[in-house]
Amino acid sequence: MLKAKVEKLSARFEEIVKTQEIVRLDAAFMALTMDIICDYSFAHDRKYLDEPDFKLQWKHTLIGAFESGALGRQFPWLSPLMKRLPISVVSAINPSVGYLLDWQGGVKDQVIPILERTDDISKHGESSRTIFHTLRDSNLPAEEKTLQRLCDEGEILTGAGSETTAQATTRIMFYLKHVPGILEKLRNEVDQAIPDASKIPSWVKLQQLPYLVSASRSFTNAVRLNWECA
């Protein structure tokens, strides 16, 4: 699944090179991570990688969620009030809160079919399962498997599962561009490990590339720490 989605993004980049279009890498990598985490969590790929702008709105949605979350901590009565209003009205009053409610609604739409066993995996008894199929069928107490509880989990997964890795990858690309020595060292290691671009080594072999793995882990941990602190 990971390989297929990375190749999909690579194909988009190849087309962009031909057209000389300017693209926001943060949005592109966010589309990649969002499609991955949604497929992994709900077996529902949102196909943000297919969007012309890589669904830039999702990035705005996440930023809006952070902003409205800070507001909600100061005024806890605000969120219940806003949820009683149409999203269009909320967005006109406060776009950040509107983005948050839209995001929550999207997660709920993905969790409900799994809980009600109306999704394809549940109906056809497919062997592949997701995080939420496993949670639904686990021996957790009933109060831990309510719709609201699982929606809360879904919001955490889609937020943390997309923003952290996308930000790390974006920053890696920045330093590869502006610090030539890093790019040269990484490129030499990758060229030796992958002499033929059409034959990508297994995940196990890629994990054995010391510079690639250590650099990626350092960036990802730093960004995750910043995200958790925020």
Image (cartoon, rainbow, N blue to C red):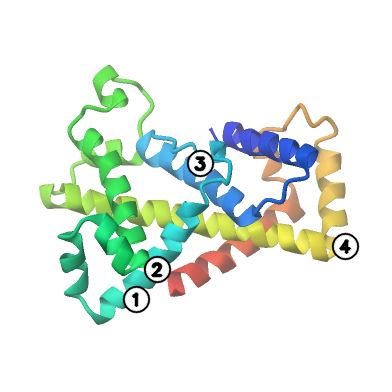
Q: Mark number for residue 66?
A: 2
Picture layout, residue 130 above or below residue 215: above
Instruction: Name which residue lies at 77% across and 27% down.
Output: 198
Counting residues from the N terminus, which is met first, the one under dot 4 or under dot 2?
2
3 and 1 marks in contact (CB < 8 Å): no
Q: How far apart are marks 4 and 1 (CA)?
A: 40 Å
Q: Can residue 156 be seen in this view?
A: yes
User: In which image quadrant can residue 80 be found?
Assistant: bottom left
Counting residues from the N terminus, which is met first, the one under dot 3 or under dot 4?
3
Three-letter residue code for mark 3:
Tyr
Seen as rendered, the residue at the extreme top is 124
- Residue located beneath label 1 in the image: 70
Q: Circle 1 — which element?
A: helix
Q: Nearer the viewer, mark 4 or mark 2?
A: 2
Counting residues from the N terminus, which is met first, the one under dot 3 or under dot 1?
3
Image check: 183 left or right of 110?
A: right
Q: Distance between the residues labelled 4 and 2?
A: 36 Å
Q: Which of marks 3 and 4 is in front?
A: 3
Instruction: Name which residue lies at 34% across and 21% down.
Output: 126
